[in-house]
Image: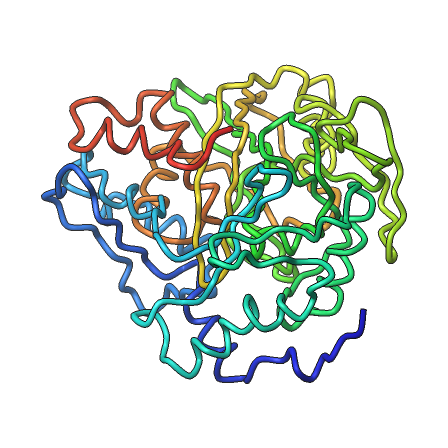
Amino acid sequence: MACNHHHLRLSHSVRSSIASLSSPLLPTRLTLSSRTLASTPIRVSSPSVSATCFTWDDVVRISDSQYSSRHSSDLQGFFEKIREKQSDFLPFVIEDQTVGYIHKGLSSDTICTAERAAITSFFDDHLKRFSNVFIFTQDNSHIMLHPVLRTPNERTRAVGDVVKCLGEELIPGIRKELYPVASLFGAPVFFLLERAAAPYFGIKAYGIQMNGYTERNGQKYLWIGKRSQVKTTYPGMLDHLVSGGLGKDKKIPGGHCRAAHFLAGPLFFHYAGYQKLPHGIACMENVMKECEEEAGIPRSMSKEAVPVGAVSYGDIDGYRYKRDVLFCYDLKLPEDFIPKNQDGEVESFRLIPVSQVADVVRRTHFFKSNCSLVIIDFLFRHGYIGPDSLGYLELLQSLRSGDCS
């Protein structure tokens, strides 16, 4: 399969426009279907708080009482963290099952015509050039894999070659980690896809996020991490104490298989430098593993983590469609516990009162976007958001607005 990397490159201006569309710190307005909330969202306008760089002092200052809303029932800032944008995507279908969504072009109200044409070519011209891998139906209703690709192994190699040809410029942050592609959680896996490419194909991904909290003098505190500045995704942003993806694996035998989280047994797959061994473990085991790596929490503590449900969302960002389901856990930690990052992905940790964390989520975009959903869920379950708040039921429902299957 020949690659023409020069032909695949987008212009600098187009890539800049894409970057401006995808800033995780820009506020997102959400149109509410059932009613309009009366309160006005409070914005962080201080010039000292940059959209791309902030310190723990900024976090603390924003959560101080002088910044607090006069109405604790104001939920508008929480709604803005739950994105429900619509756009034009083609279903990605394998064996009559929809496994993802691929953008067929950006709408005219988001980007100029010339740039839209260049970006659209990624999905039309670029993918159509790989006619031995992708089939576009005559009515342009959906995209399929070529029927000659019958086994998961063949599909993994073929799509992997396409991702490799498209390169870092179009799919940045290649991690050499493979995610399973399936129609439902626990369903047979059709093939494995490079993790960084999953949003470009609209593949549903699953992960775990754990709220690590403690109590002091009757008040609850959350441990919050600040991501390393050298992380390829969301550098320097606030994050949960522990989080991680499910479903990374490296081998598929002929026919269907159950990969990574879905594994019936450990497998190994070697493809184009993918060397990392599979997890092949259940959710709770993954929680304990991530607790050790990310926060230095021993298994004697992490085994007490409690599964408390899941949140789901669909986040459309340019031509990427991130469809995630996050399994949520709570872990009450001893008062004297101090987390210590082991894998270099966290810059530092802070213990912050839950009420102040709520203000930071409501008033800023300092948190990695999916963390905000999990924290809002925590606020509901621990009584920080009550039914007398305007929009209570709608916000609660919005936490599972994605395809939770």
On the image, the x and y values in percent for residue 5 come to 72, 79
Picture residue at 77% right of the left edge, 50% below the top: 148
Picture residue at 87% right of the left edge, 52% below the top: 271
* Residue nearer the viewer, 70 or 189: 189
Quadrant holding the N terminus: bottom right
In this picture the colour scheme is rainbow
On the image, the x and y values in percent for residue 355 come to 33, 33
* Residue nearer the viewer, 208 or 301: 208
- State how many labels appear: 0
Taking 234 as reference, is 296 above or below it? above
Picture residue at 83% right of the left edge, 42% below the top: 250
Q: Is 344 situated left or right of 333 in this image?
A: right
Q: Choose top left, top right, bottom left or bottom right for residue 317.
A: bottom left
Taking 243 as reference, is 216 above or below it? above
Q: Is 399 situated left or right of 303 in this image?
A: left
Q: Is 215 situated left or right of 186 in this image?
A: left
Which residue ends up furthest to the front in the rendered image? 138
* Residue nearer the viewer, 253 or 343: 253
Picture residue at 41% right of the left edge, 67% below the top: 106
On the image, the x and y values in percent for residue 167 come to 71, 69
* Residue nearer the viewer, 16 or 65: 16
On the image, the x and y values in percent for residue 337 come to 62, 27
Q: Choose top left, top right, bottom left or bottom right for residue 225.
A: top right
